[in-house]
Amino acid sequence: MSLLLSNFPVTTAVTALRPARYLPTTIIHRLPPLTTFNSPKTLFSPSHIRTATAAASTIEIEPLDTVVSDSLPLKKVLIPIGLGTEDMEAVIMVNVLRQAGADVAVASVEPDLEVKLSGGTILVADTSISECSDQIFDLVALPGGMPGSVRLRDCKTLEAITKKQAEEKRLYGAICAAPAVTLLPWGLLKRKKTTCHPAFFDKLPTFRAIKTNLQVSEELTTSRGPGTCFQFSVSLVEQLFGESASTEMSKFLLMDTTDEVSRIEEFNKVEWAVDHTPRALIPVANGYEDIEVVTVVDILRRAKLDVTVASVEKTLSVVGSQGIKMVADELLKNAAESIFDLIILPGGVSCVERLQKSRILKKLLKEQVSSGRKYGAICSSPSILHKQGLLKNKKATAHPSVASMLDSHTIVGSQVVVDGRLITCRGLSSAPEFALAIIAKFCGHGRAKSVATGLVFEYRAS
């Protein structure tokens, strides 16, 4: 079979194919996104898989340079979530591991599948933790957050699953507060070098606590916080699939170029400060890039910005590029009645296509610009601004695969570009820089640095 490559994440439909017995692991995240979405279904529902199979059968695919055997067994991963789980950590882990080809089950430790995370994002889990008790996983990875780590700790079913995982020498990991708050009381840090979020570091056994962003100790992998979660997730990919898969994943996430391009460039500087709590609108559609939306929302809310996630679909429920189900705050048609200081367009090929068709959003953007308010775009969504003529005489950046389609006089190679009241970003692993730049423009570098410290993310004012 020949393979047609895309630089963008697969959509829910292709993701649903992963429960099949065997799949090539390094090609899955390169399949082109599909644009057909119906109401969200559970990841493993037969109708979902049938829809995905029918759509995928029409795809022509070119082979990658890396050849992977078709007989590799699917890797099964459990990521539990509870009330107050850290938004970025949960979503980045799920997204990256699914991109790599893992069969990831997002399991709720709460009575319901809808779970409100620490930053206010509502995710819909794939299953209940009770449904996972008799399954064998290649990896169990715990996100942090408070009180999320406590909710995980108090779940007896999850405790039993994770203890069995450790006893049978299979991979397990935890990030942020979870190593100290969850794994330590379970006795799963014994004779293990461990790290965690600085706020909980003093709870770790002193002689085995390591101040490092990532610590791998035999089957256990730990990390410090949201700002180190990309590194943590790619490490888990390497342990599951090998070094070549993790290298490819780093490139896909644009992590391989973070030291080669400048973080932020600003042109035609203007003040963004307002005399009220800044209000930001993020319109989303099925196929939205999970990492970008949740990362930006999480970080902006940490700085106390008033953020509204608005669905352009007929329902509040939207499904991301990697099958992550999220409940938006309101419908775009209702949000459009309010005035926002900033409108941010997220990436994701299918999402961008659907946003481009929204007459409501088109009108909002036109009014936003004509009124002198701020607007921004990340990853592939600068193409929307380009088509509406909103990048004329502006400097911007975008995902490399989109940048080549835009005016060469417009594109700047930095991770984040600010031009007057416009802010754009390359996407994926650059999303934290994008959100922190927005905070700095509205609230100053002091606030941005404070938020970055809590994320365990290195912040530079310029």
Image (cartoon, rainbow, N blue to C red):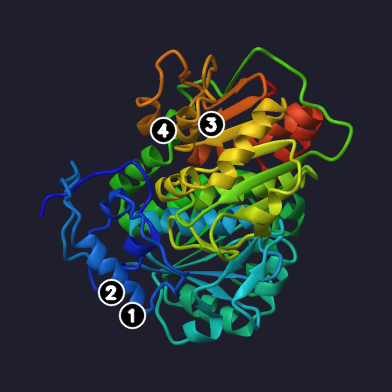
Tag 3 secondary structure: strand
Select label 4 or label 3 by which is in front: 3
Select label 1 or label 4 by which is in front: 1
Q: Which residue is mark 3?
A: 425
Q: Which residue is mark 2?
A: 50
Gap in angstroms between the C-alphas marked 1 and 3: 37 Å
State whether residue 293 is above or below residue 132. above
Mark before the other along the chain sequence, 2 or 3 = 2
Quarter of the image that includes the N terminus: bottom left
Q: Please report the residue visible at 53 percent of the width from the left and 17 percent of the height from the top.
A: 395
Q: Residue furthest left?
A: 1
Label 4 neighbour load within 10 Å: few <14, some 14-19, many 20+: some
Q: Which residue is mark 4?
A: 256
Label 2 neighbour load within 10 Å: few <14, some 14-19, many 20+: some
Q: Amino acid at mark 3?
A: Cys
Mark before the other along the chain sequence, 2 or 4 = 2
Q: Could you say which quadrant of the image residue 253 lies in?
A: top left
For the residues bearing labels 1 and 2, Cβ distance under 8 angstroms: yes
Gap in angstroms between the C-alphas marked 2 and 3: 36 Å
State whether residue 179 is above or below residue 115. above
